[in-house]
Amino acid sequence: MSNDALAIKKNGSEPTYLEYDGKGRGIKSWIFSTDHKRIGILYLVSLITFFIVGVTFGFLMRLELIAPGRTIMDAQTYNSIFTLHGVIMIFLFVIPGLPAVFGNFFLPIMIGAKDVAFPRINLLSWWLFAFGGFLAVLSILLPGGPADTGWTFYVPYSVRTGTNVMLALFAAFVLGFSSILTGLNFVTTVHRLRAPGMSWFKLPLFIWSLYATAWVQVLATPIIGITLLLVAVERWLGVGLFDPALGGDPVLYQHLFWIYSHPAVYIMILPAMGVISEIIPVFSRRTIFGYKFIAFSSIAIALFGSLVWAHHMFTVGMSDTGQFIFSLLTFLVAIPSAIKVFNWTATLYKGSIELAPPMLFALGFVFLFSIGGFTGLFQGTLSVNIQIHDTSFIVAHFHYVMFGGTGFGIFAALHYWLPKMFGRMYNLKAAKTAFWILLVGFNTLFFPMFIMGWLGMPRRYYDYLPEYHIYHLISTIGSWILIIGLTIMFTNLIRSLRRGKVIQEKNIWGGETLEWSVDTPPILENFVDIPTVTESPYEYKMNEYSETEKEEVK
Amino acid sequence: MSSQEHAAAHVHRDDVGSRMGMWLFLFTEMLLFGGMFFLYSIYRYMNPEAFHVAAKELNTLIGAFNTAILLTSSLTMALSITAIQKNNKSLSLFFQFLTILLALGFMVNKYFEWTAKFHHGIYPGGEELLSRSPGEVLFFGLYYVMTGLHGLHVVIGAVIIAVMMRFTAKGIITQTNYVKLETAGLYWHLVDIIWIFLFPLFYLIT
């Protein structure tokens, strides 16, 4: 080891992961580091960057729709903008999302390990992610113009359009590879590297959700990989696979696409549910209600969620039997999701609730996710689906689940764990203000879409009839409020990294999981000695977390 | 903690974990090909006649010969692992080399098979192919994509085994630490078994 001099500091304490640079210096000590914590932060920086780009595209889309007719861009640009918004937000933000950032950082710590099972593959998956992101950016900038197919790349249009679909397809393929490697790594890590005594039912629930997610990543992602590859081959070499002109069936493309992309929404939401299962017991000071039910519901969601894909295709002309089965399975997925919501609310009951920022975001998640979940059932109902298929109702539903759900879950995780990662505290008041603005902005932005979708406003349309104007106007105003909220939140968090109050106590919030037993920020190898686990992760004892400690943090 | 212990902590070795990682990767490979098997079965169901006619044009003899080659290569791969377990480094190297040779033999056969088809105008966008029924276009589309992707896997497998030969020669793979060779072998057997399915689907079922 080249860095032994640094390994143990003069005062006898271990260096933190922020201090230990390994072989490189400066940026090299980050982009070539195999430390799971540094890789987590690499992902954090990349994801936030892409999120801001995605938000910008979303903002421009809303601005165009503020009034009927042309406002700021032509129809072709609009088509590209909603495609880019979708591709970036889905493949570069929510899918990697929580597993890549907080999974990487905290999974080994929470199970009492020094790193993931394959640290070098972990770094490789970040590099693949960066390469995929680069290709996506390239597809925007190169002549030919950004893809205009929507993030779903439906054939035959995706085979025929003249835009840079090839690059976008290849980008999604590479990003899928990155996602597979992360999943493979996490499954092996959870199986092999749990600390002594950390039995399966002592695993924190965030780990259970990551574990279920990792299996979906491993088993579903290859399908999208091959599907996108086949579209690319069809475009490039003219091999007849999906194009009806060559005997192919475009509906088969849709099946293959959704066989991955429906489970993918569970890749997006499950880890967020895991975060909420961590935060709610901590800020209610109560043992989580129904631990095993929450753990198994993650597995059940992963399992059922993989079998419901054709509910995206109720209008393509499937057999009645097929429609019936997929509709039934869709309703079944609601059960494990509801189990989680009931268990979270039951945990709150008679708890000592502290409305710190992470808890606010977690409760926001439960509220918004419930709306998103229920409206999902509308769409699983065959007759109703015909009415609202491809309207802005589905856009609203999807954003309630993915932004109100996963997005707020990610914000909750940021407020919960960021102080632990960097050893500095953000401004609590600003964080709470940001939450309320975000909540108001979010609902103003997306709720009108339910109404206009119900009335028949199609999704992805550049222009609309005057009777929808009022809803679009309210929605666009909501997007401004949302952006104000995001700006306050990110400014507060980023500012805290340099100027926030330095914190050194290990257990900032009074959590019982292992990450609160290590130093703040964690040392290079997480633990001086690997701990032996004897208790369940949510055993709260009376008065363990004293009022004075709470005051110190503030 | 002494600095020696600290250094030792970096040499984390977990053979069971490595094998598990490889198995998970093989699952992804199976699903990758699974997507195409799915397409194949549906298109076959939709165009039974055309698939019947098109399959007759593939040379069963070359296909059978290639099957024999890949099966033998799986044997030599397994033998190379047994050899290293018995600490016979040179024998292990010999068998690994033989596996690579067989992989190359497979690819050479594939090359002649494909170019012969190209000569007859049977390739994506080729005039001869486009004059036929849509079902036959689909059959040959799937044939080229599936055997092509499989061929790519054969090449990747051969490169991996070449790297393993280097590791064996340098003493990184030894009698007590051969998990790398073992996982490379797992990958090679997968390449083999995918061909075991491709062969009857394209050559034998007519």
Image (cartoon, rainbow, N blue to C red):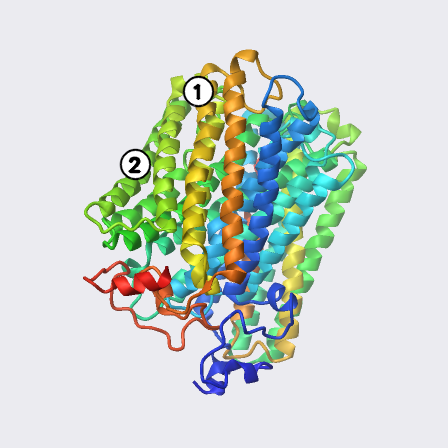
- Whole-angstrom CA distance, mark 2 to mark 1, is 26 Å
Image coordinates of residue B45 in percent, x first then y, are 53, 28
Tell me the chain of label 2: A
What amino acid type should be assigned to the residue bearing mark 2?
A: Ile
What amino acid type should be assigned to the residue bearing mark 1?
A: Ile
Q: Tell me if mark 1 has few (under 14), some (14-19) or many (20+) residues whose alpha carbon lies within 10 angstroms of its own.
A: some
* Marks 2 and 1, the one that precedes in the sequence: 2
Identify whether A427 is placed above or below A18: above
Image coordinates of residue A477 in percent, x first then y, are 53, 28
Name the residue that disc number 2 marks: A335
Left or right of B145 in this view: A16: left
Which secondary structure lies at badge 2? Answer: helix
Q: Indicate which label's residue lies in the foreground, 2 or 1.
A: 1
Image coordinates of residue A11 in percent, x first then y, are 46, 85
Work out which quarter of the rendered image holds the C terminus of chain A and state it.
bottom left
Would residue A197 be seen by someone viewing this image from the given angle?
A: yes
Image coordinates of residue B81 in percent, x first then y, are 54, 71
Identify whether A187 is placed above or below B161: above
Q: Residue at x 49, y 83 (%)?
A: A8
Tell me the chain of label 1: A
Residue projecting furthest to the right: B119
Name the residue that disc number 1 marks: A451
Q: Nearer the viewer, residue A174 or A528?
A: A528
Which secondary structure lies at badge 1? Answer: helix
Q: Residue at x 58, y 16 (%)?
A: A464
Would residue B58 be seen by someone viewing this image from the given angle?
A: no
Q: Residue at x 53, y 67 (%)?
A: A35
Work out which quarter of the rendered image holds the N terminus of chain A and state it.
bottom right
Q: Residue at x 30, y 36 (%)?
A: A335
Identify whether A513 is placed above or below A210: below
